Image (spheres, helix red, strand yellow):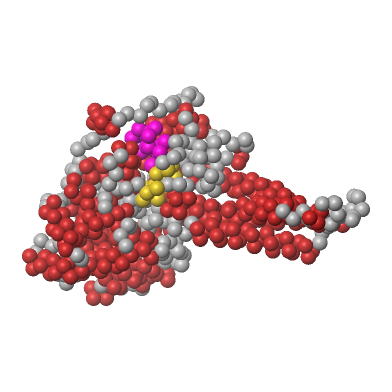
Amino acid sequence: MVDFFGHQDRARRQTGKLVFYFAVAIGLTICLVYLAVAAILLHRGREPGSLEWLWNSELFMWASAGTLAVVFLGSLFKIIELSAGGKAIAEMLGGRPVSQNTSDPDERKLLNVIEEMAIASGVPVPDVYLMDHENGINAFAAGTTVNDAVIGVTRGCVRQLDRAELQGVMAHEFSHILNGDMKLNLRLTGWIHGLLCIAIIGRVLLHFGGSSRSSNREGKGGNPLPIIGLALMVVGGIGMLFAKLIKAAVSRQREFLADASAVQFTRNPDGISGALKKIGGLYSKLDSPKAEEASHLFFGNGLGSSFMQAFATHPPLEERIRRIDPKFAGEFSESPAPTSAIESQLVAALAGDVRPAPSAPPPVPKARVMEQIGRLDSANIDYARGLVEGLPTRIVQAAHEPFGAVALCYSLLLSSDPDTRRKQTRILQSSENAAIVMEVDALTRSAVGLDERARIPLIEMSVPALRQIASSQYATFIRTIRGLSEADRQIDLFEFSLEKILRRHLEPAFTGQSGDAVHYHSLEPLLRDVNVLLSALAYLSHDEDAEVRNAYSTGVAALGGSRGMNQLSLNDCGLAAVDQAMDRVALADARTKERIVTACVEAVTADGEIRAGEGELLRAVCAVLNVPCPPLI
């Protein structure tokens, strides 16, 4: 079983390990810089064999201060550069965003696989970047949280891999997203850049000193800057070795874990092992000059072969394959020649690649709800794929472009009650332009008879397109969503869930707030907020007074006792109170969130059932807490 909260907790502890490695590397770098500068500046005039030049406290202080300043400023520069999240990494490597409405068969195959996995795992559909000029087979996931994650893929990856192999690679990348690896990797990229700046400074000094030779043409009063620059370049090269060792120490075991998770997610070891074998037959090296900085992010070794395996960011290819396929005999495969789009579609159809939509995913027993958190499951992947294929074409097209995505969200909120619908229409007409109103009307007609289980997945499918709207339009969009929800003076489960999911998934793109900070490491400071949350969930998920009281008591019991908590009245746990409570609870650490989510699950499922609306509600709560929750029906 994938322990999402455990992985998140370990990822945070891994940051402490990274800080230790980084501190050791800085300490060694300071010593090397001092020795190099001392040997150049203090050794002159000393008797041969004298070691007096080895120590000069003032020079050591300046060398330490200078080295720390360079490393700190270099790291700060890169961290600021990467503050945009995964998008910054993708653009640094030359990636371009893939249009959600692309007609390219390879790109369409890639987007379909990623969309299915996102819906099946309960994360917002990530933005996808394609590195057109990279023919090696490689991919990466980058970001600070699930809400700003992007997936980057090389052109060689989408061309050379079949659907099963591509699904295996994407499952590997989703494992990094779900296991909390992405933020650690971004930090690693930023911090290590500071070490590499030593070599950059050395190159500048070498160039500067080399252009000022008038004072040393006769060998007297020589300019020491070129020699210092050369020494710093050597120290910077050693710093690069430190960087490689740190990246290898942090990333290699996580690659094994992601491989194993991909097999567990897809239940198809041939997919990811086939991709690894094709890398062995072809290659995974990237041509980008920035590949070194991001080498620890890639699915395969993006730098080619390493002269020393200790410095490699990835385990040996043969070892990765044998852990998945113990019968592997060391023979790699090359990809067959790419087929045309029509041939690809025909092969897919004959192979059963297009399957009818299942009527429902396998039921999730109450006892297994928490087991589903933060994991992918082959049954849910199949369900997500069938669900998307069963949607009306007009609806799917709308979800994949900004104008249509806005209208689609509005249409999902329109009431069947004539009086409420008229109020909602007036709200739309006063808030949006006539084109949006017409599109909402058209999409509402296309969505007649839409299965209610498809509503939340449709919202998740719309997220990449919604991220492309203007900031001013986003403010109008959220305000209109709230107005449509409140038109009947009450908010039902779906209306509540839709708004919370949209705000959590979109706000990082428009406000720059990732929502992943940790302020609380225990439950006690959050008891009042948890009480608001459990009280509201009990009212929202049950109708009868006795059921509401039982739901609340069940949730409190899951926390380990009443702790002085008493159920609040309906007026005391309204939307404003719930919003505030959720925002505070979202600042808890992973293990505290686990206890809170467990209590919420127990409250909502106190009657032993998980109805569609209750599943949406739980997914909304999890979305606010940055906890991926798959479909629970």
Of helix, strand and loop, which mostly describes the magenta segment? Answer: helix
Question: Which of the 4 image quadrants contains residue 24?
Answer: bottom right
On the question of residue 633 being in view, the answer is yes
**Quadrant hosting residue 309:** top right
Q: Residue at x 62, y 58 (%)?
A: 71
Residue 417 horizontal/vertical position (percent): 9, 64
Look at the image and give the residue range highlighted in magenta.
Answer: 154-170
Q: Is residue 304 left or right of residue 147?
A: right
Quadrant the N terminus occupies: top left
The question of residue 165 being in magenta is answered with yes
Q: Please name the residue shown 23% across and 76% down the image.
A: 571
Q: Position of residue 586 (x, y in %)?
A: 39, 64
| Farthest residue, direction right | 47
Residue 172: image location, x then y, percent: 42, 42
Q: Give the residue at the far left of this rendering.
A: 418
Residue 485 vertical placement versus 129 (above, below): below
| Closer to us: 118 or 112 | 112
Would residue 602 be seen by someone viewing this image from the given angle? no
Residue shown at the point (82%, 52%) measured from the top left: 217
Residue at screen point 74% across, 55% down: 212
Near-viewer residue (502 or 523): 502
In the picture, measured across the screen, residue 593 lies left or right of residue 496, that is right
Percent x, y for residue 352? 24, 31
Q: Relative to residue 162, is residue 21 drawn left or right?
A: right
In-image side of 436 versus 566 (left or right): left
Q: Is residue 77 magenta?
A: no
- Report the label total: 0
Classify residue 108 by image quadrant. Answer: top left
